[in-house]
Image (cartoon, grey):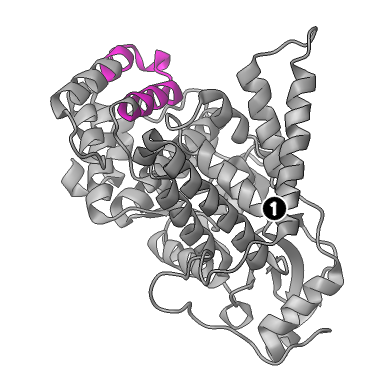
């Protein structure tokens, strides 16, 4: 392999939480600040042109579109920020949440010379185990790109390679966000309740973890162990060819789960597949406290025999025991149509001092009843969850981020299930999913 460096940096990630990208402190580079300002100006002018007389369309929607395009222009940290916002319905304007859910994380690939240099620097002599690496990536996103490869024993793998200089770019952007958050907190006392500084610091810690591919590898192996015996396939990590910035794993060959015509030709049992999609999420999240946090159709394959293949574990949700059990009780309350229990479970999950519990439970119970009293075929789960989150937010309820991520996956997979099986509904026949809830929730 060309570009071999002085030695590999492999093995498990360091003990304890990852270092935040906000530390050690460094001065902001004027070039990056100028770039952020230029994009903001460009997109602001784009909004002005869009709302000139004769143009049609809601102002909020047009502004949200310019924000999305600006985030895509600015790269990985802003793409990740947009994904975070889109995962927080109720906390941000609906038009912005909807628009940012369509963020495209596809960019031009790094040149092969940069990829080869990273492989050599990260893997050292072990890179020789890669008999062949395709110069053209299978996919290229803002943080990494994936190349096909073959090991010396002939096994087909894929190699995920982080973009060079990524930590520096993310650090610059996050320090700018941190400075802006401090300014907002000082200038707008009303904003302090939302804790913008703390939100940026949490975001920085999350990104630092995502930058270390050894963390992702650990999540993959944990979920593989949990789902052993299930008709679910997860790529197998090659530890000696995995480091902080390179992740080598077995290659899954299959059909995209969204390609229903191809699935029909393969004679796949789509009813059983839809059940596997949902049950695997409920089981891993609510019985083990870990789940795939980015299970959109692009990351789901159907392998031979109708086996579900899961890809891309860069985002993984984790629920502590208390949150896991209360979330399971929330799901069980939905299935059983216990309106007040739905409300009580949401309130129990909240971080909200000085909360009028009785009033919040009454309001949320009313919303749950207005939906769950209808025939199941008329219940729109996305709308119900959105209204519940918005109502909770109005009362000052702050739900755990990983709980909101779990709800987002539930909505993703509800859509996947309906595409596979038109009569599918997450809760319409919930009894068949209750077996995948922990005993404490039943």
348 or 23, nearer to the observer: 23
How packed mark 1 is, by other alpha carbons closer than 10 Å (few <14, some 14-19, many 20 or more), is: few
Q: Is residue 389 magenta?
A: yes
Q: Along the horizontal axis of the image, is 392 left or right of 65? A: left
Q: Tell me where residue 370 appears, x and y as whole percent.
A: 30, 12
The one nearer the camera, 86 or 249, is 86
**In the figure, 408 relative to 29: above or below?**
above
Q: Main secondary structure of the magenta part?
A: helix
Nearest the camera: 372 or 58?
58
Report x, y in % for residue 361: 19, 25
Residue found at x 57% / y 24%: 95
176 left or right of 272 in image: right
The magenta segment:
368-393
Q: Which residue is mark 1?
A: 33
Number of numbered discs present?
A: 1
Residue 288 sits in quarter:
bottom left
Residue in the image at 75% along x and 55% along y: 139
Q: Say which quadrant the C terminus sits in.
A: top left
Q: Position of residue 334 (x, y in %)?
A: 28, 28
Q: Is residue 396 magenta?
A: no
Q: Quadrant of residue 128?
A: bottom right
Kindly tell me whether residue 97 is visible in this rendering. yes
Image quadrant occupied by the N terminus: bottom right
Tag 1's secondary structure? helix
Instruction: Give residue 25's position: percent from left, percent from top.
Output: 54, 69
Q: What residue is at 18 percent from the left and 22 percent from the top?
A: 359
Q: Quadrant of residue 135?
A: bottom right
């Amino acid at each position: 392999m060309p570009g071999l460096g002085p030695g590999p940096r492999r093995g498990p990630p360091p003990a304890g939480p990852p270092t935040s990208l906000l530390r050690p402190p460094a001065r902001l580079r004027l070039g990056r600040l100028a770039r952020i300002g230029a994009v903001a100006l460009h997109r602001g002018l784009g909004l002005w042109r869009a709302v000139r007389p004769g143009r049609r369309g809601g102002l909020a929607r047009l502004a949200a579109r310019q924000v999305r395009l600006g985030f895509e222009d600015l790269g990985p940290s802003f793409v990740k920020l947009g994904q975070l916002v889109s995962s927080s319905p109720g906390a941000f304007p609906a038009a912005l949440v909807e628009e940012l859910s369509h963020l495209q994380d596809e960019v031009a690939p790094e040149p092969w010379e940069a990829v080869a240099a990273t492989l050599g620097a990260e893997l050292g002599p072990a890179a020789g185990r890669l008999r062949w690496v395709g110069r053209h990536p299978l996919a290229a996103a803002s943080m990494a790109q994936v190349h096909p490869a073959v090991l010396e024993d002939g096994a087909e793998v894929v190699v995920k390679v982080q973009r060079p200089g990524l930590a520096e770019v993310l650090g610059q952007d996050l320090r700018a966000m941190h400075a802006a958050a401090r300014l907002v907190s000082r200038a707008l006392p009303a904003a302090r309740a939302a804790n913008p500084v703390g939100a940026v610091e949490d975001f920085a810690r999350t990104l630092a973890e995502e930058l270390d591919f050894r963390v992702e590898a650990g999540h993959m192996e944990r979920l593989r162990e949990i789902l052993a015996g299930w008709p679910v396939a997860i790529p197998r990590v090659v530890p000696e060819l995995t480091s902080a910035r390179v992740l080598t794993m077995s290659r899954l060959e299959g059909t995209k789960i969204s390609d229903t015509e191809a699935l029909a030709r393969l004679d796949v049992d789509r009813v059983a597949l839809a059940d596997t999609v949902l049950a695997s999420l409920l089981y891993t999240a609510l019985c083990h406290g870990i789940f795939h946090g980015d299970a959109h159709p692009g990351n789901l394959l159907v392998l031979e025999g109708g086996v579900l293949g899961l890809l891309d574990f860069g985002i993984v949700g984790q629920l502590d025991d208390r949150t896991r059990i209360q979330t399971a009780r929330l799901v069980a309350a939905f299935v059983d149509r216990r309106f007040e229990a739905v409300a009580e479970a949401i309130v129990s999950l909240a971080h909200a001092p000085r909360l009028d519990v009785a009033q919040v439970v009454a309001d949320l119970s009313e919303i749950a009843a207005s939906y769950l009293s209808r025939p199941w075929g008329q219940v729109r789960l996305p709308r119900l969850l959105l209204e519940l989150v918005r109502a909770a937010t109005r009362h000052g309820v702050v739900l755990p981020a990983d709980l909101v991520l779990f709800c987002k996956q539930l909505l993703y997979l509800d859509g996947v299930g309906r595409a596979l099986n038109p009569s599918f509904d997450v809760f319409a026949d919930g009894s068949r999913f209750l077996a995948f809830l922990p005993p404490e929730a039943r």
